[in-house]
Image: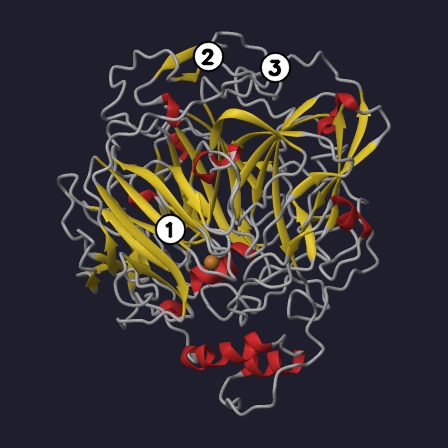
């Protein structure tokens, strides 16, 4: 996967770090690296804007808060019988002709690796009940926008008006090479699912066969990670299990409670349940303390995740359960009755609002722009919410739940309300917290973290306004510069254009019906952890080295040192760094360095933070703040910080990942593979590595197995 010129780029990185690149230099790099030698004139051009390193995004005269924030666009849920061909347990290797641009010949219609190891685990036990069929393709007009709520709850947006792929009505449409999204359209997509209703997510790759047709960044091979689903690795969007244009990939998301193979296997615990369609619930197996709520899914292409996600390959996924059913009126002793609505048995969105935050930048033509050559990270200079620029949102004077996702490439956000009033944080990442946490400022939110908060707008007069404000100033991909005070952020005296107000709440009317929602305490207590049988350490560092060559390895400044071995290693998805035994619990310590804040994501399993140390300290046991005392899947290390977590490896197997979710760090090359490979047939110990080509996926033995992996 190494790009031509990658070695030269690596040499360039130290120069690039010295200062912002000039536009002229960027052009040189884009056009070819051959002419540029290390003795080239010092970088220090003034054309690079703060914080993008690119010319500042032209505003086209737009003002903030002049367009409505669209609700996300619901993905249709269809009968499984609508899928042609029908989904299969093992990859469908029916042959088709391969485009000459992809090497010609013939290859399989499905890009999933073939054979029993990559077959859908639990396919017979959890047969798909809902089919969701999507494409990944270039931007186009949306003529089927489905917000899932009435226009009055969507700031007046008429969904029958075609929705254009643009950040503001006064900005040009994004072209089909600049923006690549699910179904090719905006708003970003939202999938609604519930426990015990397995989803077959079929994704068709409709991107250009010519990899140079990418608008300057991004790659046409893709892999979709459901972050952070509890399912087999064949459905996890493994970074090396990517697929090509004209192929599809079937992801089987069973949506099960963790522990279903060992806890409450008889489904007798009434707290472990899923909503039915008539206001009741159905008991399910597993541990209800593992109930998950707010997920998202996004591209995970090896060494291109930052570019592809930035191009638009991100969507959200709300998971409903009897605890968190999306109906605030049903009073059955299990339902937490969080703000949502009452009309449907489950998944009411009236007062339950998905928020996707992402900083963007665009070029002189208004097309998405990305700086590929800053390995510290990429920061945009425009704030978008649900992929529109600085919008407004109309609310009733009542409680709302917001599911906030940080979908940025490298930027941290810290949210407050402009009047300094209280929000109640109820969830962190996919999990409802043990107890709600009232806060006037949320914590810094790392890339890929999700915070669910409840805001009670009943304290505001109808006709008034309040704003969400970003307090975190960040001008460098390494870490935030500083968190400003609310007064400083509102005053606007900062070099970072993404600081300040970014979403205007307009309190437009009294509640249409009495607000019967609650924010109960407790919500979901943590599961009881089994005894830890193994500890491992992972240090996230720069100046990494690569020990392997070949298509599964990549070089870059970033890497991970495992269990104190050698230096930090660059990513190689053919290397096994850890292999926890099936059915065990381990304690992992994640260690960062000073001058950086890496948000570390571990796939598959939600961990409980046992302790935090390092420069960030807060009173309370083990330095774990109240809003991190549930379960998480992203762990900000904080500058100089260390996080120790406990995780259970059970139910499913295969190869998973651990990486920095500053996706520029991840791509260059702060990522490793770990695997659960002793869960029984068909798994092998170690697992062979898939090698994807348009003509079919082959397998090779692992490149390297670290001495402490097993
Ligand atoms: Cu990082």
Horizontal relation, residue 10 to residue 481: left or right: left
Residue at image mark 3: 342
Horizontal relation, residue 680 to residue 154: left or right: left
Tell me the distance, in whole angstroms, between the alpha carbons under discs 1 and 3: 43 Å
Q: Residues within 10 Å of mark 3 (few under 14, many from 20)?
A: many
Give whichever of 110, 625 is nearer the camera.
625
| Residue 97 in picture, x, y percent from top left | 33, 60
SS state under label 2: loop
Q: Residues within 10 Å of mark 1 (few under 14, many from 20)?
A: many
Horizontal relation, residue 619 to residue 170: left or right: left
Whether pointer 3 and pointer 2 mark residues with C-beta atoms closer than 8 Å, the reply is: no
Q: Is residue 382 visible?
A: yes
Residue at image mark 2: 334
Quarter holding residue 415: top right
Earlier sequence position, callout 1 versus callout 3: 3
SS state under label 3: loop
Residue at image mark 1: 590
């Amino acid at each position: 996967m190494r790009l031509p010129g990658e070695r030269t780029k690596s040499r360039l990185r130290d120069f690039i770090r010295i200062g912002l690149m000039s536009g002229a230099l960027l052009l040189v790099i884009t056009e070819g690296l051959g002419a540029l030698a290390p003795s080239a004139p010092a970088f220090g051009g003034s054309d690079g804007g703060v914080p993008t390193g690119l010319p500042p995004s032209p505003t086209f005269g737009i003002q903030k808060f002049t367009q409505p924030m669209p609700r996300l666009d619901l993905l249709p849920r269809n009968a499984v019988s609508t899928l042609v061909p029908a989904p299969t347990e093992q990859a469908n290797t029916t042959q088709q002709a391969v485009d000459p641009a992809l090497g010609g010949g013939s290859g399989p219609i499905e890009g999933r690796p073939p054979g029993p190891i990559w077959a859908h685990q639990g396919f017979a036990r959890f047969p798909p009940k809902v089919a969701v069929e999507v494409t990944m393709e270039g931007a186009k007009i949306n003529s089927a926008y489905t917000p899932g709520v009435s226009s009055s709850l969507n700031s007046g947006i008429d969904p029958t008006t075609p929705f254009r792929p643009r950040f503001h009505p006064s900005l040009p449409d994004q072209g089909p090479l600049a923006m690549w999204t699910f179904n090719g359209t905006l708003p970003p997509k939202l999938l609604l699912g519930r426990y015990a209703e397995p989803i077959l997510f079929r994704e068709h790759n409709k991107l250009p066969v010519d990899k140079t047709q990418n608008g300057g960044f991004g790659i046409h091979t893709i892999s979709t990670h459901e972050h952070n689903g509890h399912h087999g690795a064949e459905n996890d969007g493994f970074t090396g299990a990517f697929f090509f244009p004209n192929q599809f990939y079937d992801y089987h998301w069973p949506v099960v409670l963790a522990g279903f193979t060992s806890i409450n296997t008889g489904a007798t615990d009434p707290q472990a349940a899923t909503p039915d369609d008539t206001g009741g619930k159905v008991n399910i197996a597993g541990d209800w303390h593992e109930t998950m709520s707010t997920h998202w899914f996004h591209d995970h292409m090896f060494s291109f995740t930052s570019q592809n996600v930035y191009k638009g390959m991100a969507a959200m996924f709300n998971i409903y359960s009897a605890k968190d059913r999306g109906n605030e009126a049903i009073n059955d002793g299990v339902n937490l009755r969080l703000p949502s609505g009452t009309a449907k048995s489950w998944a009411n969105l009236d007062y339950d609002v998905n928020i996707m935050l992402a900083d963007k930048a665009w070029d002189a033509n208004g097309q998405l722009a990305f700086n590929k050559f800053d390995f510290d990270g990429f920061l945009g200079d425009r704030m978008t919410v649900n992929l529109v620029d600085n919008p407004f949102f109309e609310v009733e004077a009542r409680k709302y739940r917001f599911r906030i996702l940080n979908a940025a490439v490298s930027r941290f956000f810290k949210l407050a309300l402009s009047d300094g009033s209280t929000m109640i944080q109820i969830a962190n990442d996919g999990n409802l917290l043990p107890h709600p946490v009232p806060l006037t400022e949320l914590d810094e939110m790392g890339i890929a973290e999700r915070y669910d908060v409840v805001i009670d707008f009943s304290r505001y007069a109808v006709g008034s306004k309040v704003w969400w404000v970003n307090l975190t100033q960040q001008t460098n991909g390494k870490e935030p510069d500083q968190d400003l005070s609310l007064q400083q952020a509102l005053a606007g005296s900062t070099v970072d254009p993404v600081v300040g107000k970014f979403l205007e709440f307009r309190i437009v009317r009294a509640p249409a019906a009495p607000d019967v929602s609650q924010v109960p305490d407790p919500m979901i207590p943590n599961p009881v952890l089994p005894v830890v049988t193994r500890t491992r350490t992972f240090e996230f560092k720069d100046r990494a080295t690569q020990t392997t060559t070949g298509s599964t390895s990549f070089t870059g400044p970033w890497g991970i040192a495992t269990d104190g071995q050698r230096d930090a290693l660059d990513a190689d998805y053919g290397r096994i760094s850890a292999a926890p035994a099936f059915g065990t619990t381990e304690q992992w310590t994640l260690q960062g360095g000073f001058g950086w804040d890496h948000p570390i994501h571990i796939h598959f399993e939600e961990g409980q933070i046992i302790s935090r140390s390092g420069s960030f300290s807060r009173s309370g046991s083990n330095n774990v703040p109240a809003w991190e005392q549930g379960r998480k899947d992203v762990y900000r290390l904080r500058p100089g910080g260390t996080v120790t977590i406990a995780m259970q490896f059970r139910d499913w197997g295969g190869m998973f990942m651990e990486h920095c979710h500053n996706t520029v760090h991840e791509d260059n090359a702060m990522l490793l593979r770990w695997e659960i490979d002793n869960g029984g047939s068909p798994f092998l110990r170690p697992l062979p590595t898939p090698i994807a080509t348009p003509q079919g996926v082959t397998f090779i033995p692992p490149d390297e197995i670290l001495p402490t992996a097993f």
